[in-house]
Image (cartoon, rainbow, N blue to C red):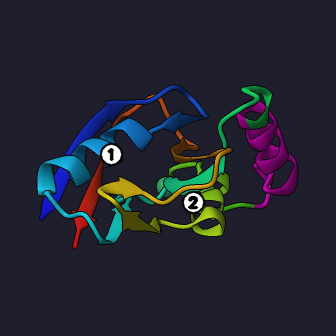
């Protein structure tokens, strides 16, 4: 089953989408399987990271800005090449194992939608198999 979720994003940031993924798995009725979380945007991404200390999310964005700065020599007319690079570096999807009708995540893990060029209205897909 394929599920589509909408979200409004800030300028940059990580949004916890684990509840939406859990909801999709529950609604699908799949107890043992795989789910794919996919971002259909070129300046956003999907990742799995720590859910305990909220500073990890802001440090993640600071680190991305440091490693992928907005360089003067970029020529892309939209002026957001740094966001395109961050999107590809993090990746458009994550695959999660479903066990007992729940995503099999580590204690400190959650699933995040990463915005690198907001604020925008975004969406992501969850395919449960
Ligand atoms: Zn662009």
Identify the residue under disc 1: 22
In this view, which residue lies farthest toward the front?
100
The earlier-in-sequence mark between 2 and 1 is 1
Determine the residue positioned at 78% across, 60% down: 73
Determine the residue positioned at 27% across, 58% down: 126
Q: Which residues are magenta?
A: 57-73
Image quarter of the C terminus: bottom left
Q: Secondary structure at mark 2?
A: helix
Number of the label disc, if any, that sits on residue 54: none
x, y percent for residue 30: 19, 64
For the image shown, how many numbered marks are present on the structure?
2
Determine the residue positioned at 50% across, 36% down: 16
Question: Is disc 1 surrounded by few (<14), some (14 to 19) or many (20+) residues within 10 Å?
Answer: some
x, y percent for residue 65: 79, 45
Between circles 2 and 1, the one closer to the viewer is 1
- Name the residue nearer the viewer: 58 or 120: 58
Instruction: Judge from the rendering whether residue 80 lies leftward or rightward of residue 95; answer left or right.
Output: right
Does the stretch in magenta take in 69? yes
What secondary structure is the stretch in magenta mostly built from? helix
Determine the residue positioned at 68% across, 44% down: 108
Does the stretch in magenta take in 88? no
Instruction: Judge from the rendering whether residue 15 lies leftward or rightward of residue 74; answer left or right.
Output: left
Image quarter of the N terminus: bottom left
Respond yes or no on whether mark 2 lies under 8 Å from ligand 1: no
- Name the residue nearer the viewer: 63 or 129: 129
x, y percent for residue 87: 57, 60
Identify the residue under disc 2: 87
């Amino acid at each position: 089953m394929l599920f589509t979720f909408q979200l409004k994003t800030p300028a940059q940031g990580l949004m916890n989408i684990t509840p939406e993924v859990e909801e999709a798995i529950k609604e699908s009725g799949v107890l043992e399987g795989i789910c794919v979380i996919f971002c259909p945007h070129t300046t956003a991404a999907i990742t799995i990271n720590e859910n305990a200390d909220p500073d990890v999310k802001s440090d993640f964005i600071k680190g991305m800005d440091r490693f992928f700065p907005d360089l003067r020599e970029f020529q892309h007319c939209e002026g957001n090449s740094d966001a395109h690079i961050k999107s590809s570096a993090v990746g458009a999807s994550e695959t999660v194992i479903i066990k007992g009708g729940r995503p099999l995540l580590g204690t400190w893990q959650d699933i995040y939608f990463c915005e690198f060029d907001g604020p925008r209205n975004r969406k992501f897909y969850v395919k449960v198999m």
